[in-house]
Image (cartoon, helix red, strand yellow):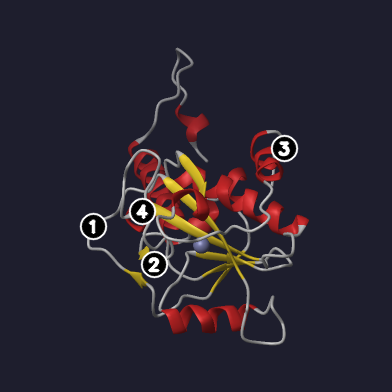
Amino acid sequence: MSMAEHKSYNGKVKFGKTDKIKFLAAVLAATAVFLINPKLITTEKDKNAPEINRRLLAWGNTALESPRRIDTIVIHTSYNAWGRDPFDVEGIIRQYKYYEVAPHFLIDRKGQIHELSPVENVADHAGRAQMPDGRKNVNDFSIGIELVNKPDTYMTRDQYDSLAGLIKDLGKKYPIEHIVGHDEITTIDKTDPWNFEWEKLNYLLYFESGR
Ligand SMILES: [Zn+2]
């Protein structure tokens, strides 16, 4: 670098014309590299983002022409009622297909998060429901998260950890104001999330940092 060569008598750095052009070229090159490869601008926060298995379903969700406003997360539980293994993810997805429904995320017993609908899409998970503030059409402004669990079993610690991590990550991207159980908003007969321990989720969300 030849900047030192252009030091003038008052000690201030003077750029020569060639230096200016070189500098500008370097800035443009660096900008181009960042634009082409967004991984280079990954922040510390992104490293904490949960690992998500993208497995998008062709049914039960609809892409919109303009972005939707999301302020609610609805928590559900599901299990495979038709097969031998009640916790089998593929069996649960077959059921969703039969009923033409889909959540945005499904968290299996090991805590693996499966993304089944893009968050930007409206997904059919809440059915007929109404928020405590009176709003209906809850699917329009919510994200649906299903956890693999039966009415007579409890969720695993890994599931709570993954759920908290996912909610924290979504909270960075969307102005989430409400986290509700399906049973709190249904206007029909939904009873899930079964055996859901809200205090465990609240502890992970508000008292434990990281993840
Ligand atoms: Zn539900």
Of residues 121 and 39, the one nearer the viewer is 121
* Residue type for callout 4: Val
Instruction: Specify which label sits upstream in the sequence, 1 or 4.
Output: 1
Q: Nearer the viewer, mark 4 or mark 3?
A: 4
> CA gap, disc 1 to disc 4?
17 Å
**At which x and y percent is residue 88?**
67, 79
- CB contact under 8 Å: marks 2 and 3: no
Instruction: Specify which label sits upstream in the sequence, 2 or 1.
Output: 1
> CA gap, disc 4 to disc 3?
29 Å
- CB contact under 8 Å: marks 2 and 1: no
* Residue type for callout 3: Glu
> Which numbered dot is residue 189?
none
The residue that disc 3 covers is 208
> CA gap, disc 2 to disc 3?
32 Å
Furthest-right residue in view?
157
Instruction: Specify which label sits upstream in the sequence, 2 or 4.
Output: 2
* Relative side of 186 to 114, left or right: left
Instruction: Specify which label sits upstream in the sequence, 4 or 3.
Output: 4
Q: Nearer the viewer, mark 1 or mark 4?
A: 4
The residue that disc 4 covers is 138
Determine which quarter of the picture holds residue 9.
top left
Relative vertical location of residue 96 with respect to residue 38 in this rendering, above or below: below
How many other residues sit within 10 Å of disc 3, few (<14), some (14-19) or many (≥20)? few
* Mark 2 Cβ inside 8 Å of ligand 1: no
The residue that disc 1 covers is 66
* Residue type for callout 1: Ser
Furthest-front residue in view?
189
Instruction: Specify which label sits upstream in the sequence, 2 or 3.
Output: 2
Task: Describe the element under mark 2 as helix, strand or loop.
Answer: loop
Task: Describe the element under mark 3 as helix, strand or loop.
Answer: loop
- CB contact under 8 Å: marks 4 and 3: no
**At which x and y percent is residue 168?**
58, 45
